[in-house]
């Protein structure tokens, strides 16, 4: 297990993974500062 | 979130095992417009088809993020009439995070899921009674108030 979150950065890629694995997407709109 | 919440080992494990984590800047077009983002952080649970099911605006501590995500998943399954899966998420929320801010809504939603899956209204009254005893000031206790009349 990674000791940090491995984020997707592209919605299309995230949706493809979510559909393949039957998981929800946790979407974080953040302020990169 | 980057300093306190996301480095938490329990948070990392839960998010990696149970979700597809996606992070985008608040002003990234067209997503920021499509989701009407006005403040950061805005945290959203989407179902696998990309439909929004749960939203949190503002900082969330490590102790609160996992129960909120469990609630979001429970709401998602509920809205898709997948009551047994909704109940699994909600039961985990209530068993492992009973003092979280998400717990009162979880109790309410559990009662509704049990009612919808059995047509027995008794779980609605049980939800109200539990809310009244444990969270008398919660908005979810007020929303469940009519269920006190169920026989």
Image (tube, grey):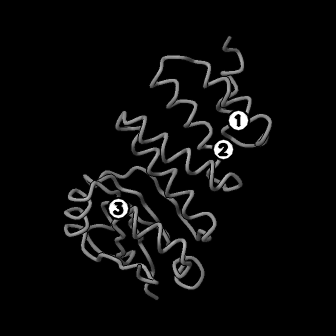
Between the residue at mark 2 and the residue at mark 1, the CA separation in whole angstroms equals 8 Å
Mark number displayed over residue B98: none
Query: Which x, y percent locates residue B72?
Result: 47, 51
Residue B106 image position (x, y, % from top left): 59, 43
| Quarter of image, res A27 | bottom left
Q: Secondary structure at mark 3?
A: strand
* Furthest residue toward top: B151
**Chain hosting mark 1:** B
Q: Position of residue B142 (x, y in %)?
A: 70, 33
Q: Which mark is residue A25?
A: 3
Q: Return the residue nearer the eye: B10 or B41.
A: B10
Spatial CA span between label 3 and label 1: 30 Å
Mark 2 or mark 1, which is nearer to you? 2
Task: Tell me the mark number nearer the camera, choosing from 3 and 1.
Answer: 3
Q: Secondary structure at mark 1?
A: helix
State which quarter of the image contains the C terminus of chain B: top right
Q: Nearer the viewer, residue B66 or B39?
A: B66
Sort mark 1 into few (<14), some (14-19) or many (20+) by Cα contacts within 10 Å. Answer: many
Q: Which residue is mark 2?
A: B104
Side of B89 relative to B50 (left or right): right
Quick check: B133 left or right of B124?
right
Please check whether the numbered discs 3 and 2 fall on a single chain: no
In the displayed structure image, the side of residue B85 where residue B70 appears, left or right: right
The disc, 2 or 1, on the residue closer to the chain's N-terminal end is 2
- Residue at position x 33%, y 52% in the image: B47
Position of the N terminus of chain B by quadrant: bottom right
Q: Position of residue B12 (x, y in %)?
A: 48, 75
Which chain letter matches label 3? A
> Which residue appears at 60% of the width and 71% of the height?
B62
């Amino acid at each position: 297990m990674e000791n940090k979150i491995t984020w997707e950065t592209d919605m299309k890629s995230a949706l493809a993974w979510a559909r393949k694995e039957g998981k929800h997407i946790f979407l974080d709109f953040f302020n990169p500062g | 979130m980057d300093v306190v919440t996301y480095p938490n080992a329990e948070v990392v494990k839960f998010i990696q095992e149970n979700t597809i984590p996606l992070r985008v800047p608040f002003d990234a077009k067209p997503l920021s417009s499509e989701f009407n983002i006005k403040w950061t952080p805005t945290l959203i649970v989407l179902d696998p088809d990309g439909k929004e099911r749960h939203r949190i605006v503002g900082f969330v501590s490590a102790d609160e993020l996992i129960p909120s995500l469990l609630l979001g998943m429970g709401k998602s399954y509920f809205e898709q009439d997948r009551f047994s899966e909704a109940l699994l998420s909600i039961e985990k929320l209530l068993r492992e995070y009973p003092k979280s801010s998400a717990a009162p809504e979880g109790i309410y939603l559990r009662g509704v899921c049990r009612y919808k899956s059995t047509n027995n209204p008794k779980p609605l009254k049980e939800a109200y009674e539990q809310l009244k005893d444990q969270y008398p000031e919660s908005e979810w206790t007020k929303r469940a108030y009519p269920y006190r009349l169920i026989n």
